Structures are given as C-alpha cells and as structure tokens.
Image: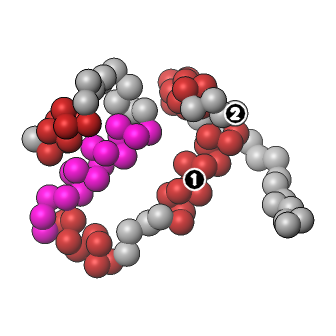
Amino acid sequence: MDTVIERKPTSFRLRTDLLDILRRNAVRQNRTLNNYVESILLDIVYNEPNDTTRAVGDRSGANDTIIAIEEAMSGRNCNKVYSSAEEMMNDILND
C-alpha cells in the first residue's frame, strides 16, 4: 500500500488557553500536537450525525449525553476522575 497523503503547512491563530489544552491532551495521548488536532478535525468532518440522529437526540435529551461524553473523551473535563465506568455513566446520565 503506497498511499501518500498530501499535507500543506497551515497557520492558525488560537487562544493561548485553548492551545495549552490541546498540547496537554496531545501529550496524554502520546501524540504530536499536529496529529492530535488533525484527528479531532477529521473526526468532526467524517462523524457528523445525520438528520435522523439529530432529530432523535433533540427529542430525547440525548444531545446532552452525547455532549458530555464528547467532553469527557476530549479531555475538556480533565479535572473529573472516575473510579469506574458505572460512576462515569451515572454522572453523564444524571446531568
């Protein structure tokens, strides 16, 4: 498999606090900052929910749960430490 992915150098101006969080999360996942940010952007672009999923989420309150899970997975809620998956799910579902 000789697939080459072309990349183009790009520059963005980001808030310093956001950049610090991105760097910290990249280190936690043992990745470069570039790789970490690229993977987040790819995930957003390719995993956008379809209209049916959005409609179900809007009616059931599932959007709040999805947002909480995404925040926990992204490290934005980095101060919260759970001792078990059950504790995390209870926290997510009871917000």
For residue 84, side relative to residue 49 (left or right): left
Which residues lie in the magenta part?
59-74
| Rendered image coloring scheme | secondary structure
Q: Position of residue 42 (x, y in %)?
A: 59, 57
Most extreme residue toward the right is 2
Mark 2 is surrounded, within 10 Å at the Cα level, by few (under 14), some (14 to 19) or many (20 or more) other residues, namely few
Q: Circle 2 sits in a helix, a strand or a loop, which is it?
A: loop
Mark 2 to mark 1 CA distance (whole Å): 14 Å
Q: Which mark is residue 19?
A: none
Amino acid type for the residue under numbered disc 1 = Leu
Q: Which mark is residue 32?
A: 2
Residue that label 1 marks: 41
Q: Is residue 5 above or below residue 24?
A: below
Q: Residue at x 20, y 71 (%)?
A: 56
Q: Main secondary structure of the magenta part?
A: helix
Q: Quadrant of the N terminus?
A: bottom right
Q: Quadrant of the C terminus?
A: top left
Amino acid type for the residue under numbered disc 2 = Thr
Q: Is residue 23 visible?
A: no
Q: Is residue 65 above or below residue 18?
A: below
Tell me which numbered mark, 2 or 1, is placed earlier along the sequence: 2
Q: Which dot, 2 or 1, sits closer to the camera?
A: 2
Residue 87, quarter of picture: top left
Q: Residue at x 22, y 50 (%)?
A: 65
